Image (cartoon, rainbow, N blue to C red):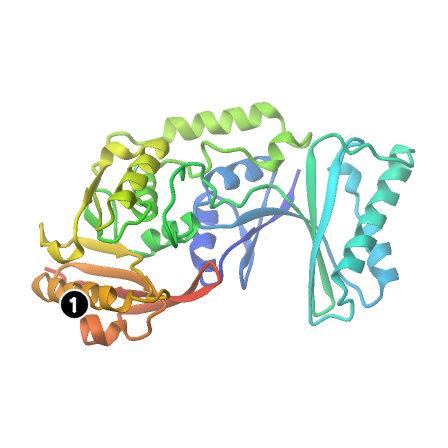
Amino acid sequence: MKLELIATATFGLEAVVKREIQDLGYKVIKSEDAKITFLGDERAIVRSNLWLRSADRVLLKMGEFTALTFEELFQQTKAIPWEELIPIDGKFTVTGTSVKSKLHSVPSCQSIVKKAIVERLGEYYCIDHFEETGASYTVKTTILKDKVTLTIDTSGTGLHKRGYRVCDVAAPIKETLAAAMVQLSFWRAGRLMIDPCCGSGTIPIEAAMIGRNIAPGLNRKFAAEDWELIPEEMWKNERRSAFEAVDYDAELKIFAFDIDGKAIEAATENAIEAGVDDCIIFKRMNMTKLAGRENNGIIITNPPYGERIGEEKQIETIYQKYKEFMAENPTWSLFLITTDKTVEERIMGRPADRRRKLYNGRLEVCYYQFHGKKE
C-alpha cells in the first residue's frame, strides 16, 4: 500500500532527518519546519521507526484539507476511509493543535474529529458502540492557517526513548539531539572522539551506536506493532535484518569523562544497557586535566549552561581549558551545544565555522562548530 508518512523533528534538525530518510531509500516530497513528508509503504513504517536517529515521531498522514467551519471539518474528516486502518475493536484517541486558524478551539476540534471518525466507522461496521479494546490509534489534528492535517502516530512513545537510559543525571540531553550532533560533526568510526562533560553518557552512547550501525529503535516497542495493517512477521524480519547489520568489528575510540562520579556510574550503566560499554572508555576526571592524545580528534559535548546559581565559575573554568586545549591542539575540532552566546569569543577568539540554532527541550541553544586545521 502506498502511504504518505511524516517524520517530525526538533526545529533545526530537518536536514539531518531528511538525509536519514533518504539513506533508507525513501523519497522525500516535502521538508517544512519540524516535519519531513515522505513516501513509503507498510515496511517503511517499520524501518523508519527502527532506524531514524534524529526524528521525534513517525506519523501516518490520513488526509489534508482546508476547513473554515466545524461542519467542513466534520464532513471532510468523515470522508476519509478510516476503516482501512482502524479495526472494529480499535482504540482511538484524538489530540490536536490550532495556530492562526478560524477553528481555534482545540477541544471542540478534537471532539468533532472524534465524532466524525466514530460515525464513519459505525456506518462501515454497522455498530453504534465501540468497545475500543484493541490496538491504539492516536489521531492528531493539526490546524495551521485553516489547513487541517490528520495523522495517526505510528511510534507511540517518542523516538528519543531508545530504552537504554536506565540511570539519569540533571539536565540530560535528548537522545535524538545527541545523535544529530554526532551526525553533524566530522566524526567517523576510527577517529578519536571525546566528551569531557558526558553526564549520563548520551552523546558517546549515540556515537557508539552510529559507529556500530546499531538501529536506535532495536530494543523498544512501537504503537504500530499492534496494528492489523502491518504483519507481525514484517516486524520480526526487519528486526532480524537490523541485528545482522550491527558491525561488531568497527574500530571505535570514544572517551567519556565527567567530574561527577555518579554521572560516570550512570553513563556506564546506560552504555551497558545499550550494548556499547565495550567501546567507550568512561572515566571520572576533572575537565582541566584534558590533554592531547593524538591529532585530528573531535570533542563533542553538552557542557553546563549556567542556568543554576553557582555554575558560572565552573563554566568559566571549562571554557578556559577548552581555549588552552584548542590552542595547543590546532588539528582538533570542537562541537559544542549551549545557550551561551559568548562562547565564540571566550573559547576560540573567532567566529565558529558553522553554527546552528536548535532546541534542547524548551531551551533555545546553538550548536557551535569549530573545525581543526587540516594536516
Residue that numbered label 1 is attached to? 320
- Asked which quadrant contains residue 308, the reply is bottom left
User: Which is nearer the eye, 266 or 220?
Assistant: 266
Q: The N terminus is located in which quarter?
A: top right
| Direction from residue 339 to residue 240 in the image, left or right | right
Residue 144 at x, y = what percent? Answer: 68, 66
| Direction from residue 105 to residue 319 in the image, left or right | left
User: Which is nearer the eye, 238 or 366?
Assistant: 366
Q: The C terminus is located in which quarter?
A: bottom left
- Asked which quadrant contains residue 171, the reply is bottom left
| Direction from residue 136 to residue 156 in the image, left or right | left
Q: How many marks?
A: 1
**Above or below, comparing residue 313 to residue 141 in the picture:** below
Residue 250 at x, y = what percent? Answer: 24, 35
User: Which is nearer the eye, 373 or 327?
Assistant: 327
Q: Which residue is drawn at 45% across and 36% down?
A: 163
**Above or below, comparing residue 74 to residue 229 in the picture:** below
Going by the numbered disc 1, the residue's amino acid type is Gln
**Above or below, comparing residue 112 to residue 267 in the picture:** below
| Residue 100 visible to an observer of this rendering | yes
Residue 195 at x, y = what percent? Answer: 24, 51
